Image (cartoon, rainbow, N blue to C red):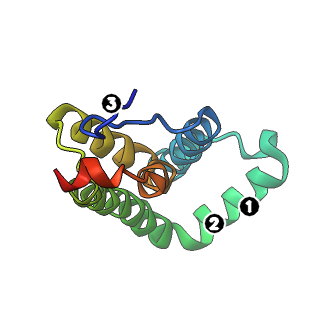
Amino acid sequence: MAKSDGYAYFRRSSLFWILTVTLSMSYYTWLVFWPHQIPYDSLGPLGSLSKHLVNEYYSIMYKGWWCAWAIHFFEALAALKVCSDKGIDSPSTRLLWFVQTVLFGFASLGLLLKYKPDRHAKQQ
């Protein structure tokens, strides 16, 4: 948890966002790299949509997959800058924010942006 001076402030993303982002990105990865293994007929409307996207827009989906990870990476770099701005100086805590933001994107960065460090502690 957080020390009172904000030096090692870290919050884990909520379980909802961890599951949502993990399942979504896993399914997207499956669609992009192993589309022939997906049981489209068993997935109902999601399967129909997925099959259509793979058949008609595969190259866009492939580029979108790389773009999604690039966005997460740049959000993680932004998280490091926000850590500096908010006085979070612990290297291990900054690494936690970076890794969590790479994995979960704005679900992590949003927690960091909401953090309001104590003014007195930040000025020291």
Q: Is residue 76 above or below residue 58?
A: above
Q: Amino acid at mark 1?
A: Leu
State the residue lying farthest toward the front.
120
Write down the residue under mark 3.
3
Mark closer to the observer (1, 3): 3
Residue drawn 52% across the image and 44% down it: 30
| Residue 42 drawn at (x, y percent) | 80, 39
Disc 3 or 2, which lies upstream in sequence?
3
Labels 1 & 3 near each other (Cβ < 8 A): no
Q: Earlier in the sequence, mark 1 or mark 3?
A: 3
Q: Residue furthest right?
A: 44
Query: Residue at the location (44% across, 51% down)?
Result: 115
- Residue 4 location, x and y as percent? 34, 34
Can you say whether 19 is above or below 73 in the image?
above
For the residues bearing labels 1 and 2, Cβ distance under 8 angstroms: yes
| Whole-number angstrom distance, CA of label 3 to CA of label 2 | 47 Å
**Mark 1 lies on residue:** 49
Label 1 and label 3: CA atoms lie apart by 47 Å
Name the residue rendered at 17%, 43% in the picture: 89
Q: Classify mark 3: helix, strand or loop.
A: loop
